């Protein structure tokens, strides 16, 4: 998920350089959304943990 956030940010920066304000806004907002949701999922995973396997 962090990979996609980085790609959205990269495309957003290119769009800013080309003065495409609408595309840049959507790309940067998408990158923030993916980054924050990835961090929330990481925190949930760290708090809950993972149960051991039953054999």
Image: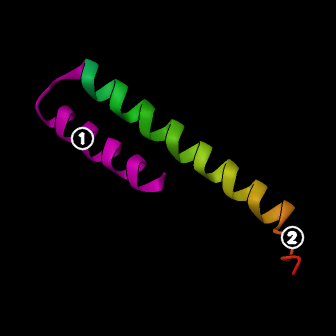
Q: Quadrant of the C terminus?
A: bottom right
Q: Is residue 10 magenta?
A: yes
| Label 2 Cα neighbours within 10 Å, binned few <14 / some 14-19 / many ≥20 | few
- Residue farthest along the top direction in this orientation: 22
Distance from Cα at disc 2 to Cα at disc 1: 39 Å
Residue at label 1? 11
Which stretch is magenta? 1-21
Image-based side of 22 in relation to 2, left or right? left
- Vertical comparison of 13 with 24: above or below: below
**Disc 1 on helix, strand or loop?**
helix
Image-based side of 31 in relation to 48, left or right? left
Of the two numbered discs 2 and 1 in the rendering, the one whose residue sits closer to the viewer: 2
- Residue farthest along the bottom direction in this orientation: 55
Residue at label 2? 51
Q: Residue at x 68, y 51 (%)?
A: 41
**Disc 2 on helix, strand or loop?**
loop
């Amino acid at each position: 998920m962090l990979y996609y956030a980085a790609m959205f940010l990269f495309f957003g920066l290119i769009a800013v350089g080309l003065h495409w304000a609408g595309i840049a806004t959507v790309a940067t907002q998408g990158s923030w959304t993916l980054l924050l949701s990835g961090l929330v999922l990481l925190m949930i995973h760290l708090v809950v943990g993972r149960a051991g396997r039953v054999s």
